[in-house]
Every structure is written in structure tokens, then in C-alpha cells.
Amino acid sequence: MTVKIDLQVALGNEDEYEYDAGLLNIPDEAELTRIADAATEDFVEKGEITIRIVGEEESHELDLQYRGKDRPTNVLSFPYEYPEGFPEPDIPLLGDLVICKQVVEREAREQNKELMHHYAHMVVHGCLHLLGYDHISDEEAEEMEGIERRILTEKLHIPDPYAGER
């Protein structure tokens, strides 16, 4: 295992520390670890990522605050930046991913994708952002999508999420 996952589930009424991933229809910590490992193993030896699964209200607030977008979004990535002069810990902190349950569910339905496959895509996409990849320009988008496709299809055996889009 290359990545340690700190999973937080904050969906409103549910207790953030007591939940059943199956009942909530979200990936559990073991599955998120498997996905994050596949996404990062070619880039880092080890690291720690916090994955926070949230509702639309929190996603909306964060998207507005950090990206100026007045809506909830599927995944937000917050790479960790070490304060100057502080030593790196034994396990490097890669950053945080915030995934909106309702947006991921809606997109999976609209795009006719299996829900857990779409969660995997969001985790892979978010991990690549934590590693410095972006999709602002067409060239960056093509590079990032190519890496996502390879990780999803070859390592996780999930159909190409971009098939039929171009």
C-alpha cells in the first residue's frame, strides 16, 4: 500500500464517525485506498490523503469559496502545502479530496455509469490534481484524461469514462 486514506463522511444528519458505507451507497475506506493506490503508485512511494464525502450544501460552500463557482461540484482537490521551514513527516501529506455524494450520484445516472465506477473516476481525478495535474488547457486536459483512462482501464478494470465524449 502506498497511500493511507483518512475517510470522513459528513452528509448532514449522519454522525461523521458512525456510518455504514453500504447503506450510504458510497465506497468504503478499503475500496478508496485501493483506488487511491492505483492512482498514485506510479508517482509517489507513499502518502496520506483525506477523503471527505459531503452533501450538496458543503460542496456548494467550498466550491463558491475556493473556485468562485456558485454550485456544488463532484470533486474538489486541496493539495497540501508544507509550511516553510517545517520538516516533511514520515508519510507525506498529499492533500484532501472533497466528494459530493449527490452530484456523483446524479452524474452517474445522467451518464449511464455504474455509481462505484464514477466514484473511482472522481478519486483518480482528484488524486491527479493533488499530484499537480490540471485540465485548464486542452493539452493539459488530454494528458490528464490519458492518465485517468490508463489508471481506470488497466489498473482498476473500469470502462473508459470519456468514451464517446469526443
Image (spheres, helix red, strand yellow):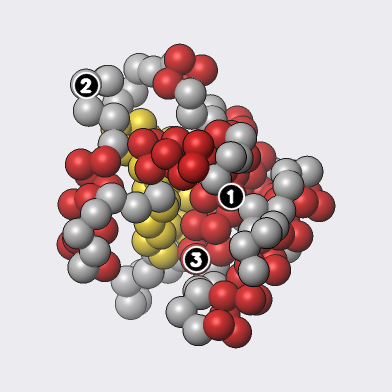
Q: Residue 71: x percent and y percent?
A: 24, 54
Q: Tell us which disc is closer to us: 3 or 1.
A: 1
Question: Label 1 vs label 2: CA separation?
Answer: 26 Å
Q: Earlier in the sequence, mark 3 or mark 2?
A: 2
Name the quadrant containing residue 150.
Answer: bottom right
Q: Tell us which disc is closer to us: 1 or 2.
A: 1
| Helix, strand or loop status at disc 2 | loop
Query: Disc number at residue 13?
Result: 2
Residue pointed to by mark 1? 121
Residue pointed to by mark 3? 129
Q: Earlier in the sequence, mark 3 or mark 1?
A: 1
| Helix, strand or loop status at disc 1 | helix
Q: Residue 114: x percent and y percent?
A: 61, 35
Residue plotted at (50% across, 37% down): 109
| Helix, strand or loop status at disc 3 | helix
Work out which quarter of the rendered image holds the N terminus and state it. Answer: top right
Residue 137 visible within the image: yes
Question: Label 3 vs label 2: CA separation?
Answer: 30 Å
Viewer-closest of 63 and 166: 166
